[in-house]
Amino acid sequence: MKIGVIGSGSWGTAIAKILTDNGQNINWWFRSPQTIDQLIARRHNPHYLPSVHFDITSLTLSSEAESVIKDSEVIILVTPSAYITDLLEPLPSAIFQGKKIVSAIKGIVPGCNYLLNDYLKEKFHFSLTDYFTLLGPCHAEEVAAEKLSYLTVSGVDVDATTEIAENFKTPYLRVLHNTDVYGVQYAAVLKNIYAVGAGIAHGLEYGDNFLSVLIANSADEMAGFLRRTGKKSPQVGTIIHQPRPASAEQDITNYAASVYLGDLLVTCYSLFSRNRTFGNMIGKGYSVKSAQLEMNMVAEGYNASKCMNAINHKVGAEMPIAETIYKILWEKLPAAEGFNGIEAELL
């Protein structure tokens, strides 16, 4: 299958490495033609993961998203969620007909507060059966260093999901798959919000003991949200070893699996986590704007906190930690005051 990668940040570059390591020739979209010229000259992305060198003969590079999509059977979307509508809105309505889309986006589409599959259904009449997700825990920097990592591919079509997952298996990657398309996406969005909170706590000079309790309560909060959205049994610490029929996986979530609890833990603790870094700066007194300028990278948890706050008004889950993080980031609640309130909520 011919694969197109839409996105050239650190995670997009890591995905391109994984695929080309597996012998895939890929179509790869870059926003900037100048960056394409630099990659061709230097054999690496000049802005992200410069240690990763590419065989240029395995890459077809373009700054035209429409041409990359037309020339690919499987399109991997790996741009920040805040910019996804700017990319997709100008495209022809039938452009994804006959294609498969793999989302590596860990965010909510702003404005409509949709998961990407629901946005694609409304805008492009795209079927859920041709939609898949590619989620962690898997930091791009560790992929670049070929440290053992785990990915989960999710899709409702089990055979197609398995086939897509095969393209990402390498000696340094273990690839799992499930059918919980909605649950894995919501978990990926929420873990970024909680990682911002973990960073804020660090910036406020809370210790590891508090942080462990904060993350444990965040895990429980996430599980509660998933239960309210239809997952029958996401329980913290419950490990399900026995395989189940695919139909059952729609209702039962192995919450201890890497794509749920594992991704939450690494995003909250890792120094590679941009959401944790962003939160740490907020805790130290940076404004949101100054923290964003300093990082020069997108922390998905910022926009996600606003989107999930709106979504949860409909879902009605108890989420005091996520709500407090939203108020700190969007309503200018002082971080120290917000975390004084969180202290009273933790169990």
Image (spheres, grey):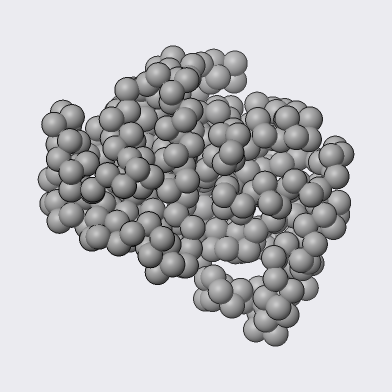
Left or right: 329 as drawn, with respect to 187: left
Indicate the quadrant where residue 163 lies.
top right
Pick the residue in front: 100 or 58: 100
- Which residue appears at 40% of the width and 19% of the height? 316
Tell me: 107 left or right of 160: left
- Any part of residue 40 in sight: no
> 209 or 166, which lies in front?
209
Residue 197 location, x and y as percent? 29, 46
Residue 287's place in the image compared with 1, above or below, is: below
| Residue 156 placement (x, y as % from top left) | 65, 26
Give coordinates of residue 127: x percent, y percent. Answer: 75, 28
| Image quadrant occupied by the C terminus | top left
- The answer to whether 346 is drawn above or below residue 212 in the figure is above
Q: Residue at x 57, y 63 (%)?
A: 9
Residue at 70%, 71% (x, y): give it.
32
For the image, the number of numbered tags is 0
Give the residue displayed 56% in from the left and 74% down from the top. Answer: 47
